[in-house]
Amino acid sequence: MRGLEAALLRYRILAMAVGTGLLILTAVGVPLQYLAHNKSVVEIVGPAHGFLYLLYLVFAFELWVRGRWPLRRLIPMILAGLVPFLAFYVEHKVTVRVRGEIAQARATALAATAQPT
C-alpha cells in the first residue's frame, strides 16, 4: 500500500504540472505566436512541457504497474498530457479510484487481523 500511495503522489504532482503547462502553452503561447508573432512563451513552455510530460509518463507507468491494472487504465493517463484540461479530469478520476482501492485493501487487512484464530 505504501508504494501505491507514494506513486499516486508523484503522479498527481506531475499531472498538475503537465496540465498547467499544456494550458499555458495552448491558451497563451500559441495565440501569442500566431497573433502577435511572439514565440517567447512557446520557446520556454514548450520544451518544459515536453520534459515534464516524459516524467509524467514514467510516473503514470509506475502507478499502473504498482496498481496491477489492465492496459485500458493506462491509456487515458497517457492521453491526458496531450489534450488540454484532460490531465485534470483524469488525475481526479485516478486519485478517487486509487484512494478507494487503498481504503478497501486496508479494510480487508484490518478484517483479516481482527478475526480470531
Image: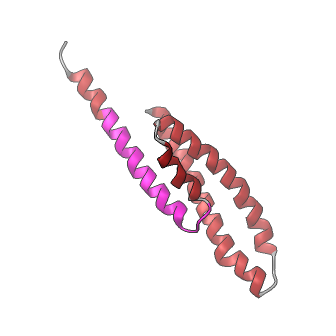
Q: Residue furthest top?
A: 117
Tell me residue 13's x, y (percent).
Answer: 57, 52
Seen in the picture, residue 8 relative to 113 is either above or below; the reply is below
Whether residue 74 is in magenta: the answer is: no
Q: In the image shown, does 64 or 70 lie closer to the viewer?
A: 70
Q: Relative to 76, is 38 on the left or the right?
A: right
Query: Relative to residue 95, is residue 85 drawn left or right?
Result: right
Q: How many marks?
A: 0
Q: Identify the colour scheme used.
A: secondary structure
Which quadrant: the N terminus? top left
Residue 20, by quadrant, is bottom right
Q: Main secondary structure of the magenta part?
A: helix
Which residue is at a point 52% across and 46% down the rendered structure image? 9
The quarter of the picture where residue 46 lies is bottom right
Estimate the x, y position of residue 116 in percent, counting from the top left: 17, 16
- Farthest residue, direction left: 116
Q: Specify the quadrant that holds the C terminus.
A: top left
| Residues in magenta, as a range | 82-106
Task: Find out whether residue 90 is within the magenta segment.
Answer: yes
Instruction: Say which residue appears at 63% left-offset and 48% top-offset.
Output: 57
Residue in the image at 47% along x and 62% along y:
89
Q: Position of residue 47 (x, y in %)?
A: 77, 61
